[in-house]
Image (spheres, grey):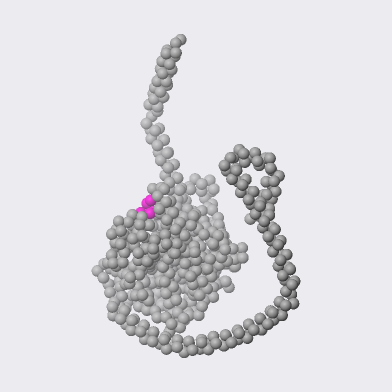
Amino acid sequence: MSPESMASDCRTDEVSASELVFRAASMVPAAHYLLACLIVLLVFVYNLLEFHFFRDLLRGFRGDPVVLTFNPNSYIYEGIVAKCRMLRGRYVPTPWLPSPHLQTAFLHFYGRPPNVSYRRQLFCTHDGGTIALDWLLASDVAGDSYYKDKSITQDDTTPIVVVIPGLTSDSDSPYLKHLTYSLAKQGQNIVVSNHRGLAGISITSDCFYNAGWTEDIREVVNYLHQKYPKANLFAVGTSVGANILVKYLGEDEGSTPIVGAVSICSPWDLVVSLTLVCDRFLNRKPIQQFYNRALTIGLKDYAKLHEHVLTRLANWEGIRQSCLVREFDNHATRVVGKFETVDTFYRCCSSVNFIGKVAVPLLCISALDDPLCTREAIPWDECRANVNVVLATTAHGGHLAYFRGLTAQSLWWVEAVREFLNVVQSSPYMHQKKKAPTQGLHLYHEPSIDKGPFINIKEDGNVATSKKYEAQNDHKEELLDSQINQNTKSEDIEIVNIDQRKNVDAEDVQQVVVSSGQELENKNDDKVIHEVAASLNNSVNKLLLKQQMSIWLLVYISVVRTWPILGSALCIVFRKQVRRILSPPWIGNKG
């Protein structure tokens, strides 16, 4: 057979094979193809939404244990966390919410919050800003109508829990209603410190809140400590509010009146959580792009409420066209906060830089599948280094969701916070409060919501303080400044006298120390010089030996990376020398 005929037969066989495959495929019913496409689609959605239903099913819906990270010498773990059943147990998610995205969406759109009715108090800051403090007292949820009109007295010893909401959230958010109702049921008075410009309150100054703005919570805490000095103050921060809380605790260290605190789903490192998450990680998948744009829409809605102020302070056109969180921060937050760049703002406001200085019992709760505050930003080592901090992480939970039970009526982290604060309250490890500041050092304004002459209600429903009230406050501040100046003059004279006496005493002590030191030096001069010289010579010899080993090791590494085969041959030929170089204990030991 000629070569031409053989090639023709091969082409005929190839065509025949492809035709056979096509005919076989056409014989498969269309329903089977639809079923295959449906299976592929389900697998894609299952992985996209990070479902863990089959994993939970195989494990018998037992959930995963709560992983605790703490310092080995932590008295917070031994004396407080070890007594908390929720933190030492397991978190079992709601079976029909087996995804962090489903949990987060269900909390936002439904949430099943209890019915809560707050008492509003307007608080004016030193720069003229207005904050809405929404109170829920223990008597409000007691169920007895006799106690519903009860107010807090100055000598009240009932613990007060200050709650800091998350980004663009206020006291009406479902997760905050779960928290405030549960804590009030336990017998504590709750006050939600809403952010500026939220909860229906207008911006009354040129200052806006951001992820690192701690002045507002500092003023509110000091005010509460001054007005209710006998009540223990606790604090709970959620999401961005948790970042603000931890940063505040680290800034004030041991001088804060807070005796115990809890951080829930904190972003920790804003460079990672907002730059890596929103600009890189969130753009990898369509579901993360949705979170990025959803957050931006919430920020733009917040900006529209205060357009008359932001058009003067920030780049309003850039705010209006922002599609990402980073773009909004570049045109609004960075400009109003007077930061050079967005990354500078993120670095300065990250609470990870301050957690090492926290001096109060602090419980931090984070979910490893949190779609917003990702696990890459969790400061494991920083939490482990501080004896006052205990980090509790769970495999699932979403962002501030943590639904549990078949009916999803409660949030796991709310019960964990309630139990932790209850144990702290009855333990000897509670942070000791500082003495409340005197009336002459700070001036706080505490108008109630029912004091009509001091409130202006605008057409858009926002509430602002009136000019009459501001003028009265300015007059009070002028009188207070004159009193403080007179008091500080006499205090300065006393401080100068004390410093002079300290200087005289210090000079006498220094003369005695110098004379005694000279006598000892004359006696032991030769001996000390000999010992120092011997020790220095020994250290130099060891250093030279290690340097030689390091040089040969670097040469070997260079050869291996450049010529792998030659490096392997040298390793075989000079294996004894290589083993001798790698023998020092600092390489072989395991941490």
Residue stretch in magenta? 289-294
Q: Position of residue 448 (x, y in %)?
A: 35, 77
Q: Position of residue 168 (x, y in %)?
A: 37, 62
Q: Position of residue 557 (x, y in %)?
A: 60, 46
Q: Residue at x 42, y 71 (%)?
A: 215
Q: Position of residue 390 (x, y in %)?
A: 55, 63
64 over 468 or under it: above or below: above
Q: Is residue 351 left or right of residue 540?
A: left
Quadrant location of the C terminus?
bottom right
* Count of numbered circles in the view: 0
241 over 122 or under it: above or below: above
**Residue 139 visible to an observer of this rendering:** no
Q: Residue at x 66, y 52 (%)?
A: 548
> In which image quadrant can residue 5 be found?
top left
| Residue farthest along the left direction in this orientation | 459
- Does the stretch in magenta take in 555? no
Q: Residue at x 26, y 70 (%)?
A: 458
- Does the stretch in magenta take in 291? yes
Q: Residue at x 34, y 67 (%)?
A: 197
